Structures are given as C-alpha cells and as structure tokens.
Image (spheres, grey):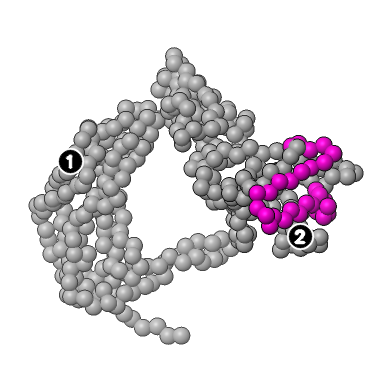
Amino acid sequence: MFSTVIDTFNRVQVTGHTRMDSVGYPEIPIISYLVAIPTCDSVIMNIELFDSIKYSNVNIYSAPELIPDTTAEGNIALIEQFAYNCTVYETDAWFPGTVAETIDKGAIRAQDVIRVLFYPIQFNPVKKEIWAYSQAKVTLTFMNASGSIQKNVGIFNEVVGNTLINYNSNGLNASVSCGAGLTDTGFVYRDSLLVGQKIGNKCDYLIVTPDEFFYNEDILNLAIHRSGFNGFDVAIITTSTINGSLLRYIDLNYIEGSYWILEGRIVERIGNTTVYMLPEPVYVIDIYKGGPFRCYYDDSFGPYNPTPTIPCDYTTNINSELSMSLRVFPNPLNDFMTVACSESNCLTVIYGTRGLLR
C-alpha cells in the first residue's frame, strides 16, 4: 500500500451546532432549529442577511466515514476514516449553494412543527474561498393556516418546550408531580379490544405492551405511579390490538404419560404457534415440514409471523368459500360424524390427532 498527500484541510465548527455529514462532501456547519407552527398547507421561508465576510485560502475538510474498530481494551468503537468526493471538490461553485431551507414538516403529538436549517458558510472548493454569515433574519409565512401556533401536548409539554425554540412549556411532564396527583388522582384501565383502533376512554398516558405483559405487575405499578403521582389517566393496551384483530387462544399443557400429544398455544384462525404441528400427509417428522404456523394472512388481521428469523415458505389464511361448502354434523360429535359437501367431486380425508389416517 502507499499514501499520497491530497491537500491540507480546515475543520469549521459553530459552537452548539452540528455539521453536514454526507461522506466525502465538505463538512459545512449547520444551524438547525425545530419551530412550532400552526396547522397549515405549506410554509414559505424568507431570509434576510445582515452581514458577511469573505475568507481565502480555506479548504473545508470532507465528512469522514465512521467505521467500527477494536480499541486496545478490546471494545468496539467508531472511528473516522477519511473520504473524499473528487467531483465535489473539483466543482467551481458555492457549496451547499443555498443559505437556508425548511425540511421535515410534521408533528409532535398535536403540535405541528417544521425544521429550519441555516448554512452560515458557503464554500468554493476550487477557489478555496468561503463566505461567512453571522446575522440573519428568517421569516416564515404559513399558507392556509388554522388554529394557534402552540398546542397542548399533555405530559410532553416539557419535552417540546426544550426542543422547539418558540414553545412555552406549562411545566407539566412525566417525571415531576407538579402536585397534580396529590389532589386529583387519575384512573388506570386496560383496553383489551381497541374497538375501531380507538381507546375506550381518553387518557393522558398510554402504555403499549406485548400481550404477555398485559397483566404484568410491574406494568401495573408504573400505571398506578403515573396515576397517583402525576394525576394522569393511564390506559394500557397490547401490540396485538394495533392495526389488527384481537385473537383468542388456548394453552395446552402436556401431562407426562398422557396418551394425547397435543400441547402448546393454539391461536384462533392461526393454529399452534409454539410447537410442531402434525406432519401432513407424510407420517415422518421432517424438520423442514410441519412446525408451528409461522405465516398467516387475512384482510382483517394482516400478515403474521411469530418467528421472523424463519422465512415464510407458506401462508395459511381463511377461505370463506371453501369453509361454507363443507358441513360437519353433529358438532360436537359423539359416536359418529357426517360430512356433507356441496360439490360432487368433494374428497374428505380424516386424520386423527396423532396424524393417523382414519
């Protein structure tokens, strides 16, 4: 290997702010602010520069690539690896070419926000010159605006107040009591249905947990703490009720020495999701066959894969037409069973619970 000198560089930093990090491009300082705005269709920005100064013989360093490396102590750390975009540094033009812009129009809870970016330095890599700006006035115009600029974001008031430059917090947050819970204790409730993807009652604090932690004591204690300490109304929901259907299930526990071998969790419409299913129709267990129903889909529930590390090599779903064409009676059966099929070429194959053909 060999090395050669490309050039000498200068690193420029505005205290308290960051720099552009596109690998190989000039590390131009960025002054970034998140701003509270009213609900509107769009935002138009105007910038007025009050001063500027030009510097020569300045070559701004290119943003390095961060790569993992092992330290002397055996730890993994990210280190800077030099990167250089020849096309950019051989272009006789000002970079980045714009002094300010707005990006990321969105919201934090009910609060509409937009990010304002100001580039205080313009750099010409060929001439090795920079223009630097220290004072500017930014004006934002809101198109088709409605409502007030500042919205109530509940317990996120303090977070939003510390994040947005023009948001005045009321001091309420999730970590400080503020005396709220001393006189007005909130309530705690579990919503296991999430009808219409909506919580049954309004709440100040929402806990979303996996199904197995829905009745967990630590989760409940957290909810009680927020209710009693902060005075919040707290709701607890599960991940399975979000954007899907709530499915019932039964757990079968194997009894040592029992004739029956069924065990595991059987989920409504999906099947056994924890242990191997009976092989079909071969009666030899194949590690690539059978197994839990990893993949399931219907229009209501959507895709389901409890073991994402295993690929979906098959998908089960509900076929309403086929299920309506077959009738089994009596149900439940006692000594005999009659199967009626609406199609003339219907073939019925019956297997026992141990996979044996009947």
Q: What amino acid type should be assigned to the residue bearing mark 2?
A: Pro
**Residue 19, how many percent across, how many down?**
30, 59
Please identify, in this view, whether the residue under mark 1 or under mark 2 is nearer the observer: 2
Under circle 1, the secondary element is loop
Residue at the spot of label 2: 281
Which of 231 and 263 lies nearest the eye of the viewer?
263
Q: Is residue 285 left or right of residue 85?
A: right
User: Horizontally, is 339 left or right of 53 in the view?
Assistant: right
Instruction: Give the magenta range.
Output: 331-358
Residue for point 58% across, 49% down? 321
Image height check: is 230 above or below 250? above
Secondary structure, magenta segment, majority class? loop
Residue sticking out furthest to the right: 257
Whether the magenta-drawn stretch holds residue 344 is answered as: yes
The amino acid at mark 1 is Asn
Within 10 Å of disc 1 (Cα), the crowding (few <14, some 14-19, many 20+) is few
